[in-house]
Amino acid sequence: MKRSDAYPSKYVSKDDLTRPVSVTIQTVVIETLEGDDKKEDKPIMYFNEEFKPFIVNSTNWNTIEEAYGLDSDEWVDHKIVLYHDPNVMFGKKKVGGVRVRIPGAKAKPLTVRPDGVDTDETEEV
């Protein structure tokens, strides 16, 4: 059993992305999430497709903002690709995480995940 099976998440995680997934932005709202020791307001993205909501961190926010504008209301009905990037760091530890890219944008060099899958294969949801 995987950790993600034992402790399922309401939100998109790297474990949900065995291959990149293309989704259409429906809305972005601020929601209060409970952490280990406090509550925090975070931007949560919902999609037109049936897929888990996505907690948008500042790195991913910047990627979307560069493509679709400063106001998240302008992002509605635009597509993004969610993928697992094994090189995401937490402090000094490489933990992997969810990243966003814009379909049709100049691609960065391909990243090959530890399971041998390259991140340019995109699955439509």
Image (spheres, rainbow, N blue to C red):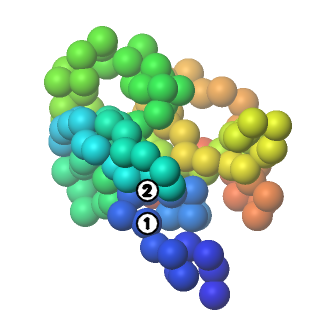
Amino acid at dot 2: Val
- The reply to whether discs 2 and 1 touch (Cβ–Cβ < 8 Å) is yes
Q: Position of residue 82 (x, y in %)?
A: 47, 46
Q: Quadrant of residue 81?
A: top left
Name the residue tied to disc 2: 12
Amino acid at dot 1: Ser
Q: Mark 1: which secondary structure?
A: loop
Using the image, determine if residue 90 lies above or below residue 118: above
Q: Pick the residue in front: 43 or 34.
A: 34
Q: Is residue 109 shown left or right of residue 70?
A: right
Name the residue tied to disc 1: 9
Q: Is residue 81 shown left or right of residue 33?
A: right
Question: Residue at left 48%, top 26%?
Answer: 58
Question: Residue at left 21%, top 37%?
Answer: 29
Question: Residue at left 25%, top 49%?
Answer: 47
Q: Mark 2: which secondary structure?
A: loop
